[in-house]
Image (cartoon, rainbow, N blue to C red):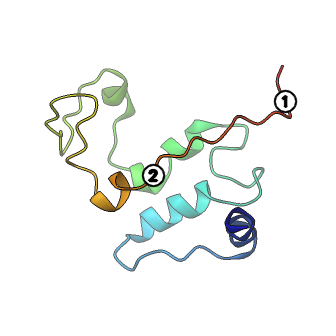
Amino acid sequence: QDHEKLFELILMEEIRFPRTLSPEAKSLLSGLLKKDPKQRLGGGPDDAKEIMQHKFFSGIVWQDVYEKKLVPPFKPQVTSETDTRYFDEEFTAQMITITPPDQGNTT
């Protein structure tokens, strides 16, 4: 029942962004989250180039990304694969549920 309500909200409601998001971030997310896949940013004939050319990424030199030359602004110091210290307890305290795979298309 909750899933049905969630899907209904996804289909019917407009996205509300926090005021703290930049106009560029809002534009990028709006483009990526278009309900119609044909209108979605990156869903056209230019594929990912549409996303890469978005004004949100205007300062990115993509060749540097490919060559791993960029230094991340934050690099978490983790001790293992299960180190969750950078995740909010709101999420790490939740019960884990595994969604079964869709049985409709098993080719």
Instruction: Tell me which amino acid carries mark 1.
Output: Asn
Answer left or right for 104 relative to 56. Answer: right
Q: Which residue is mark 1?
A: 105
Q: Nearer the viewer, residue 47 or 20?
A: 20
Q: For marks 2 and 1, give the one nearer the viewer.
A: 2
Dividing the image into 4 quarters, which one contains the N terminus? bottom right
Q: Position of residue 62 (x, y in %)?
A: 38, 33
Q: Residue at x 63, y 44 (%)?
A: 42
Q: Nearer the viewer, residue 106 or 63?
A: 106
Q: Element under label 1? A: loop
Q: Residue at x 40, y 49 (%)?
A: 57
Q: Which residue is mark 2?
A: 95
Q: Element under label 2? A: loop
- Vertical comparison of 65 with 95: above or below: above
Q: Position of residue 105 (x, y in %)?
A: 84, 30
Question: Gap in Å between the C-alphas at discs 2 and 1?
Answer: 28 Å
Residue 18 position by quadrant: bottom left
Q: Residue at x 72, y 64 (%)?
A: 7
Q: Nearer the viewer, residue 75 or 55?
A: 75
Instruction: Tell me which amino acid carries mark 2.
Output: Met
Q: Residue at x 71, y 34 (%)?
A: 101
- Vertical comparison of 59 with 13: above or below: above
> Which label was assigned to residue 30?
none
Q: Position of residue 55 (x, y in %)?
A: 45, 56
